[in-house]
C-alpha cells in the first residue's frame, strides 16, 4: 500500500506515527466502494444494481466515505506493522483523523511496543536467605490464638474490665439546646479501640443496669477534626457484660482443635507449620531479591497499558468500586509495575534458557496432585481443565524452573532473620 509514515515520537515503548494515504489511493477506494454499493442498493425507479453510479455516490456519500475510512485505516495499520516491524504490546489508538474531500487521508497512530529485554547479566549476585527462627514463645503465641478462637463469652454481674464485651446505651447532647437523646445501642470489646478512652473509662466504672453521666474530652487525634479536644457530656447505661473464657490448655483442647492425640502433638504440629511458613517466606524473599537484582542490572521499559491492566486485576481481586479507581491506581501503580516487570523477567529468562513448562511437566504435576488426593490423574486433569487452572499450573512450574536456575547461578547464603 502506498502510504507515508512519519515518526513523531519514539520514547521507550511508546510510538507516535503519522500516517498519510495519498489522494489517488483514497479516490481508488471510493470508486471501489461506490461500485459495491451500486450492485447492491435499491433506488426508486431502478432495478437492483442498475442505478447510475453518480446517483449512488450522491445518495450514499456518507456511508461510502465511512467505509473508505475504515477500510483504509485498517489496511494502513497492517502496512505500518509490516514495514516498521513492530511488535505491539496493546491495542493501538488512532487519533487526529483528517479526511477532507479532495485531500489525502491522514491520522496519527499511538501504540506501545513490546520491549526487547537483553539479559546481559543474570549471575554474580549475592543474596542472604534469612529464615525466621521459630521459638517456644512463637509457638505459645500461636497456641493462644487457637485458644482464643475456641473461647466462649459468659455473662458476668460485675464491673467490666479490658477484654470484656459490653452492651451499652450511649448518648451525647444534640441540637441547639444540647438535649440528651435516648441512648443508642453499641456492642464494644473494651480495649479494642472501638470507643474513645474517656468513654471506656466511664463504662468500666459501671455495673450491669447502672447509668452514669459526665463530661468526657475527645482525643486530640480524633479523626473528625471538628471534635478534637472537645469536651461534652456523655451518658452511658451498661446493659450487660460478657467475659471471654478460653478452654483449658490440655489434651482435650488438642483433640478439639484437630486430629491430635495430645497437647504435645499439637505443639509439634504448630511448630512444623510455623517453620514451613518461615521457610516459604525466606524463599520468596530470595526469589524477589534475585529478580530485583536482575532487573536493576538489565533495565527495560514496561508498557503502561500492562501496568493499567494489572491495576484493573487488583481492583477486581479487592472489589474496589469504579469511582475509587483514580485513588487506588495512584496508590498501587508502583506495586503493579513491579509485578509486571517480575512477570516479564520470568518470561524472558524462561524463553532464553528454554525453561518453559512442557506438557510432560504439567502431566507429572497433575499426577502428583492425584496421588495426594488418592484419585485418578485423568479425573484431576479434567477437573483442572474445566476450572481453567491448567495455565496456572504451567505458569507455576515455569517460575519454579526459573528460580531454580537463578539460585544455582548466584551466591545464596543462609542467615537468621532478626
Image: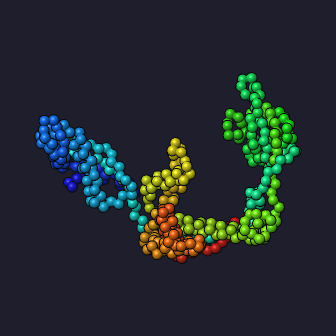
Q: Position of residue 351 (x, y in %)?
A: 43, 70
Q: Position of residue 15 (x, y in %)?
A: 35, 54
Q: Position of residue 119 (x, y in %)?
A: 44, 69
Whether residue 154 is visible to the viewer of this picture, yes or no, is: yes
Give the residue displayed 80% in from the left and 36% down from the top: 236
User: Is residue 215 left or right of 119 when viewed as pictured?
Assistant: right
Residue 183, located in which quarter of the rendered image? Answer: top right
Whether residue 205 is visible to the viewer of this picture, yes or no, is: no
* Quarter of the figure with the C terminus: bottom right
User: Is residue 106 left or right of 391 when viewed as pictured?
Assistant: left
Given residues 245 and 403, the one toward you in this image is 245
Q: Position of residue 178 (x, y in %)?
A: 75, 26
Give the residue displayed 74% in from the left and 40% down from the top: 186
- Count of marks overlaid on the render: 0
* Quarter of the figure with the N terminus: bottom left
Give the residue displayed 50% in from the left and 64% down from the top: 389
* Depicted 276 relative to depicted 88: above or below: below
Amino acid at each position: 500500500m502506498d502510504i507515508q509514515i512519519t515518526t513523531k515520537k519514539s520514547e521507550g515503548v511508546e510510538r507516535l506515527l503519522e500516517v498519510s494515504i495519498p489522494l489517488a489511493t483514497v479516490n481508488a477506494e471510493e470508486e471501489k466502494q461506490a461500485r459495491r454499493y451500486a450492485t447492491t442498493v435499491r433506488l426508486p425507479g431502478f432495478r437492483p444494481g442498475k442505478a447510475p453510479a453518480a446517483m449512488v455516490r450522491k445518495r450514499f456519500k456518507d456511508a461510502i466515505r465511512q467505509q473508505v475510512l475504515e477500510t483504509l485505516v485498517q489496511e494502513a495499520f497492517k502496512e505500518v506493522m509490516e514495514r516498521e516491524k513492530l511488535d505491539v504490546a496493546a491495542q493501538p489508538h488512532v487519533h487526529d483523523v483528517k479526511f477532507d474531500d479532495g485531500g489525502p487521508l491522514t491520522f496519527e497512530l499511538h501504540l506501545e511496543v513490546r520491549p526487547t529485554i537483553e539479559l546481559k547479566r543474570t549471575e554474580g549476585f549475592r543474596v542472604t536467605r534469612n529464615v525466621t527462627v521459630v521459638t517456644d514463645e512463637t509457638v505459645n503465641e500461636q497456641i493462644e490464638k487457637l485458644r482464643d478462637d475456641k473461647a466462649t463469652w459468659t455473662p458476668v454481674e460485675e464491673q467490666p474490665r479490658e477484654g470484656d464485651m459490653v452492651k451499652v446505651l450511649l448518648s451525647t447532647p444534640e441540637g441547639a439546646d444540647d438535649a440528651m437523646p435516648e441512648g443508642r445501642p453499641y456492642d464494644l470489646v473494651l480495649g479494642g479501640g472501638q470507643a474513645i478512652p474517656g468513654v471506656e473509662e466511664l463504662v468500666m466504672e459501671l455495673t450491669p443496669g447502672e447509668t452514669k453521666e459526665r463530661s468526657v474530652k475527645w482525643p486530640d487525634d480524633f479523626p473528625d477534626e471538628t471534635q478534637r479536644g472537645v469536651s461534652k457530656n456523655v451518658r452511658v447505661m451498661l446493659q450487660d457484660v460478657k467475659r471471654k473464657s478460653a478452654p483449658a490448655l490440655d489434651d482435650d483442647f488438642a483433640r478439639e482443635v484437630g486430629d491430635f492425640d495430645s497437647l504435645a502433638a499439637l505443639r509439634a504440629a504448630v511448630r512444623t507449620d510455623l517453620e514451613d511458613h518461615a521457610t516459604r517466606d525466606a524463599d520468596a524473599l530470595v526469589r524477589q531479591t534475585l529478580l530485583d537484582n536482575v532487573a536493576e542490572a538489565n533495565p527495560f521499559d514496561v508498557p503502561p497499558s500492562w501496568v493499567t491492566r494489572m491495576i484493573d486485576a487488583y481492583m477486581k481481586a479487592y472489589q474496589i468500586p469504579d469511582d475509587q479507581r483514580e485513588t487506588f491506581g495512584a496508590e498501587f501503580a508502583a506495586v503493579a509495575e513491579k509485578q509486571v516487570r517480575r512477570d516479564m523477567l520470568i518470561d524472558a529468562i524462561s524463553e532464553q534458557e528454554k525453561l518453559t513448562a512442557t506438557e510432560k511437566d504439567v502431566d507429572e504435576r497433575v499426577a502428583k496432585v492425584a496421588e495426594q488426593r488418592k484419585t485418578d490423574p485423568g479425573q484431576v486433569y479434567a477437573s483442572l481443565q474445566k476450572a481453567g487452572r491448567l495455565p496456572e499450573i504451567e505458569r507455576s512450574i515455569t517460575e519454579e524452573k526459573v528460580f531454580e536456575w537463578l539460585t544455582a547461578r548466584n551466591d545464596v547464603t543462609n542467615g537468621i532473620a532478626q
